[in-house]
Image (cartoon, rainbow, N blue to C red):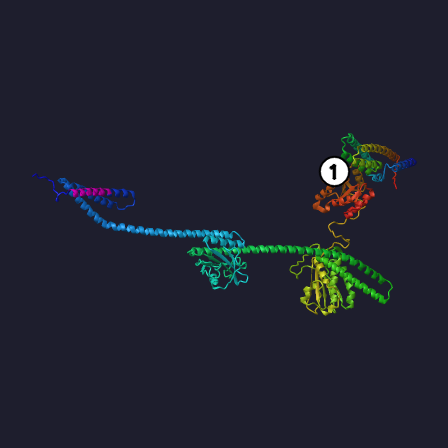
Amino acid sequence: MEVCNCIEPQWPADELLMKYQYISDFFIAIAYFSIPLELIYFVKKSAVFPYRWVLVQFGAFIVLCGATHLINLWTFTTHSRTVALVMTTAKGLTAAVSCATALMLVHIIPDLLSVKTRELFLKNKAAELDREMGLIRTQEETGRHVRMLTHEIRSTLDRHTILKTTLVELGRTLALEECALWMPTRTGLELQLSYTLRQQHPVEYTVPIQLPVINQVFGTSRAVKISPNSPVARLRPVTGKYMLGEVVAVRVPLLHLSNFQINNWPELSTKRYALMVLMLPSDSARQWHVHELELVEVVADQVAVALSHAAILEESMRARDLLMEQNVALDLARREAETAIRARNDFLAVMNHEMRTPMHAIIALSSLLQETELTPEQRLMVETILKSSNLLATLMNDVLDLSRLEDGSLQLELGTFNLHTLFREILSLIKPIAVVKKLPITLNLAPDLPEFVVGDEKRLMQIILNIVGNAVKFSKQGSISVAALVTKSDTRAADFFVVPTGSHFYLRVKVKDSGAGINPQDIPKLFTKFAQTQSLATRSSGGSGLGLAISKRFVNLMEGNIWIESDGLGKGCTAIFDVKLGISEGSNESKQSGIPKVPAIPRHANFSGLKVLVMDENGVSRMVTKGLLVHLGCEVTTVSSNEECLRVVSQEHKVVFMDVCMPGVENYQIAIRIHEKFTKQRHQRPLLVALTGNTDKSTKEKCMSFGLDGVLLKPVSLDNMRDVLSDLLERRVLYEGM
Amino acid sequence: MNTIVAQLQRQFQGYIVSLYQQGYLDNQFTELRKLQDEGSPDFVAEVVSLFFDDCAKLINDMSTSLERPDHVDFKQVDSGVHQLKGSSSSVGARRVKSVCIAFKECCDVQNREGCLRCLQQVDYEYKMLKTKLQDLFNLEQQILQAGGTIPQVSMN
């Protein structure tokens, strides 16, 4: 027997079984080798596998297992010792690695499991975040809707548009089924359905305002969920819908205009609210979300503001319309008043003339009659007639004066007069009556009272007569004193400063009587028209009550002041007035005209040295006119054209004679230009006289319209020229000489 | 001597009255004579000589304007007539003035023939007047030289 190192298998080789084992081992080996390869491949692919060391270990384990099985293939037949050795090594290594792996896995598998747990946790977290994101997005969209809604609402100032838009937009944003607005009625006791979203013409439907559900909604500024069955929510008949959508109601404050103060915001306890009711679609499982409720609240606020703006606008438009109406009415009233005034003035003017004429006739004839032989009764009758007609004439004058005074159309007629004489005259006028009533009158003129003054003599006399007359009239006994003085300063009226200027002074006249006196309360009424104090004593005396009113107005015209002081009934009274008068230089001043600026030039017989300018294009005429004037003694300058005339004319020339014979209007332009040249120094402008060959009225009118002072017909005779010149220089205007 | 002066004066008076009566002169001339005094002894003579010079010039201008039948400047003629009328009324040349009035009417209707006729007449009249006044002045000089004074003639 040969001894070989072959090892004999334990069991007899069964061919089939052996074959199957062989194949299985082979496949196991392949699988065992391919698994690590797959593992490596896929792990390489993924970046996150944390346990490479384990992988290596595992790989080693599997490889060795595979190797083992692979080597097993050789052990089915007789195999050499080497194979057996390799086999043993392989198995040994495998055992080692397996044990190591097994030990490692004890640590690793819990870790792996926890990874899974974390993964699950993160997934949950992600889902949660998604949800929240969805929520935020919704909120943001809601915010956008609010902004857009607000914009829509605030973009119009029309109340109806605002409300309609609100409902429409809300309905759209929140996908509502129905949206309604209830406004409080005028009485404030009911809410009336004013606007709805779906129904075009809402039925006029009211609910009383004191419902508990309404109170609940009005009690808070938040949107409140209410029952779909409450009266405010039942807008349409329920038709077969068994599940009404949720309903929310919110109050909309209606701000009154009167609540706005500049610096204070209005209190929200205005107690006037409208109700906005929003209904979700029925049969949907939708619920009101918090953000939707917030949206509704915000919108309600915005609507309130927009409505108040609209209300303000309406108010201001109304006020403006009212003002325009009032304006028109006022204008009409003014025009009517003007017409009335004009009519009255016309009437007065006519009546004045119409009344005065017969009046004068009566007075004149009565006076004449008085002069004839009359029996005593006749004389008495005539005297009465005269007295009555004088009274009537005075009354007419008074009325006319007063109306003219009120219009401001009365002008004072200034003149120089003797003040002392005036007082004495007045005294002599009053003395007869005073003597009859046994009232001594004393006159006291201050020593510094100027003698010759400038003022309206007639009216001053009227004033003094009126006051003194009143004093006499209302005094039964005692005495009357009249005092005139120059007043330097007036301590009575704070707003009336008496400043005597160089050529003016203020005359103060005090008339004191010891008569019935006047109740201090009646004093203000004294100066009103047609008013008389109603004491019995005075009822018998005549007068129309106009005297004091007229006197006051005259005094005011003379830039003065008049007032009455009295200590009470029965204690007499003092009437005092101040008027402004001018001081006149000498006592020989002749009566001056109303235009005080130009000093009167006495009539010249010769005009020696008078500088004149003659303008005539025609040489011959020029020479003749010059000759005329030279003969009269004037110093004559001649010019032959308009331009030359303008150049030469100066303030030394007192008269300019200009030939206006040439047809056309250019000649007259020179007059205008001379006027312009001398506009600043009006009184130094030379007199302008036209020399013309035309005799007609239109030439005269044309000359006047162009500002010429006179017209002369050519050729002028010497006498004519002489007369004309003196007239011209004296009166500064001449439209004779034709 | 006196008689010569008196005679001359009578002659002067008669002559000037005849001038007035024949319509050569009117009141304006009297006025002119009133203006003559020691200050301006030759006033009248100066004025009338100026007038005659003016006449000559104006007539010349107007005849030039009226020369060409197709191209008559009536405006110029009108202004010339106006001037002439003014001057003649200033000195009291009555006849000249009357012709000027007629002349103006022709000019207004732009009647060239009429204007030419009037122009001729004006020319004739002023020359006549010139001669007459020349005689008058000569008489005046004679009186002055004889030591007399020129009598004032008043026309009623």
Nearest the eye: A121 or B93: A121
- Image position of A588 (left or right of A320): right
Nearest the eye: B106 or A170: A170
Circle 1 is placed at which residue position?
A641
- Residue B58 position within the rendered picture, expressed as x and y whole percent measured from the top left: 79, 33
- Image position of A146 (left or right of B1): left
Nearest the eye: A88 or A320: A88
Residue under the image location 81 percent in, 32 percent down: B113
- Residue A223 position within the rendered picture, expressed as x and y whole percent measured from the top left: 45, 58
Badge 1 crowding class, 10 Å Cα cut-off, few under 14, some 14 to 19, many 20 or more, is some
Q: Is residue A29 magenta?
A: yes
The image quarter in which residue A312 lies: bottom right
Residue under the image location 82 percent in, 44 percent down: A720
Quarter of the figure that contains the N terminus of chain A: top left
Residue under the image location 21 percent in, 47 percent down: A101
Residue A38 in the image: above or below residue A377: above
Three-letter amino acid code at disc 1? Ser
Magenta part of the protein: which range? A15-34
Residue A408 visible in the shown view: no
Nearest the eye: A222 or B148: A222
Residue farthest toward the front in the current orientation of the protein: A16
- Residue A436 position within the rendered picture, expressed as x and y whole percent measured from the top left: 78, 68
Chain at tag 1:
A
Residue A342 visible in the shown view: yes
Quarter of the figure that contains the C terminus of chain A: top right
- Image position of A727 (left or right of A205): right
Report how many numbered discs are placed on residues in the image. Answer: 1
